[in-house]
Amino acid sequence: MATASAESSAAPSPSGEAPDYCDLDPFTTEAAGHRFTFYPHGEDRLKALIALIESAQKSLMVFYYLFDSDTSGTMVRDALVAAARRGVAVELIVDAFGNDAGADFFEPLTEAGGTFALFSPHWGKRYLVRNHQKFVIADETRVMTGGANVSDHYFATPAENGWCDLSVEIEGEVVAQFVRWFGLLKSWVANEAEGRTRQLRTLRDIVRTWDGGQGPVRLLVGGPLVRSGHWAWVLRQDLVSATRLDTVSAYFSPPRSFRRLMTQIGRRGSARMIMAGKSDIAAAIDMARLLYGQLLRARVKLFEFGICKLHMKLLVVDDISYFGSANLDKRSVRINVELMVRVEDAGLAAQLRKLIDHLEESSEAITPAWYARNSTFLNRMRWRLAYWMSLADYRISKAGTV
């Protein structure tokens, strides 16, 4: 999402002081014939991203929702430029709405022989569709994806109020799906640049016909007004019979059908959700709080992480893990172009639940008593206003502090 900051207090410790908190160190897990290395710490994410770019020998396929011209953005751009100069085929696509750096910032890349393009640069109804993905493919054998964009905010430490986020580097057969997906996006962007019509319909067709495979590791995607096959459609099938659900979501406003399934899991099993107690968008917290009452009545355990801004997208449903670019909100489910990696592996699910445990330890529990104190008439009115305004565009609700 966008990078403007919002003020909020961290969850207090019993002594009334903000607790000490450190992101976990990187950890690697072998699962379902793949190798996954997770980077919960911002500085580690930046180092790993630069190392991935510097190690490329043949090709780099790069797509980011947001790319800034700050210190981190300059480092990543310069690494891409250096790769192009040593003969690596570098292709970079950035979402037009998220391109904070500006086209001129990328001229050194094109001068070095790389390519740069914008996703949906023209105004119109398709401009409302954000291509919210973040991934880098090196030599068609390794991919890094997750929630982190290219900006200092995503690599700063919690003490600096950086994003609490997650990136993962993947080696294995699913990388071939990323390569194929990038090729489809690149073709769409090229047609868009040539001014061809019906491009929104073409984008929907690309998403609707996408097949990420049927194995234990799948690349799922989503896009505007697509249902069957969408990442959220697959998630919904997993939720129907699940008995355990653990989520970390920076923006929480899923459609009613998803909330109903989540409450059913809370009643028949165990459901835990880490929400944002601090965010770049003030309304993101308000729109989630509007839904707390329904969840609490279903015995869903709720927590707000307020140490720093939360941007992580992590879902664990029984023994199935989801991670990638999508939030549990209506834009990610119904409008934005998103990707999520789905992995069926009990060991990986257990490992990722430990990460969620770590976040819970430094979060504030949202209890029925908390909700009773805070769900005043005026607060509920503000929460509802934020909820409906955010459906049109998050930009409308960026102003203000929490």
Image (cartoon, grey):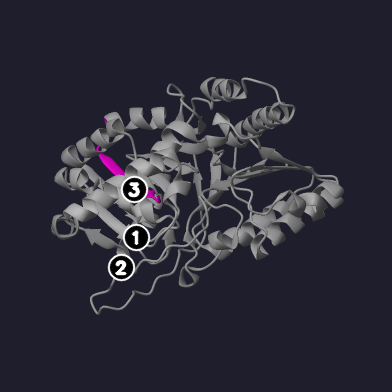
Can you identify the residue that label 3 sits on? Answer: 386
Q: Estimate the x, y position of residue 123 in percent, counting from the top left.
A: 61, 35
- Helix, strand or loop for disc 3: helix
Residue type of the residue flagged with mark 1: Gly
Who's the residue at 50% across and 43% down the image? 325
Can you identify the residue that label 1 sits on? Answer: 277
Q: Is residue 84 left or right of residue 214?
A: right
Q: Where 322 falls versus 273 (above or below)?
A: above
The quarter in which the C terminus is drawn is: bottom left
SS majority, magenta:
strand
Front in this rendered view, residue 387 or 78: 387
Foreground tag (3 vs 1): 3
Neighbours of disc 3 within 10 Å: few (<14), some (14-19), many (20+) = many
Give the residues drawn in magenta, as a range. Answer: 241-250
Question: Within the magenta stretch, is there residue 244?
Answer: yes
Front in this rendered view, residue 40 or 26: 40
The disc at residue 236 is none
- Helix, strand or loop for disc 2: loop
Q: Earlier in the sequence, mark 3 or mark 1?
A: 1
- Asked whether disc 2 touches disc 1, contact meaning CB atoms under 8 Å apart, the reply is yes
Who's the residue at 39% across and 39% down the image? 391
Front in this rendered view, residue 100 or 50: 100
Q: Estimate the x, y position of residue 385 in percent, counting from the top left.
A: 31, 46
The disc at residue 11 is 2
Q: CA distance from mark 2 to mark 1?
A: 8 Å
Residue type of the residue flagged with mark 3: Ala
- Displayed quadrant of residue 11: bottom left
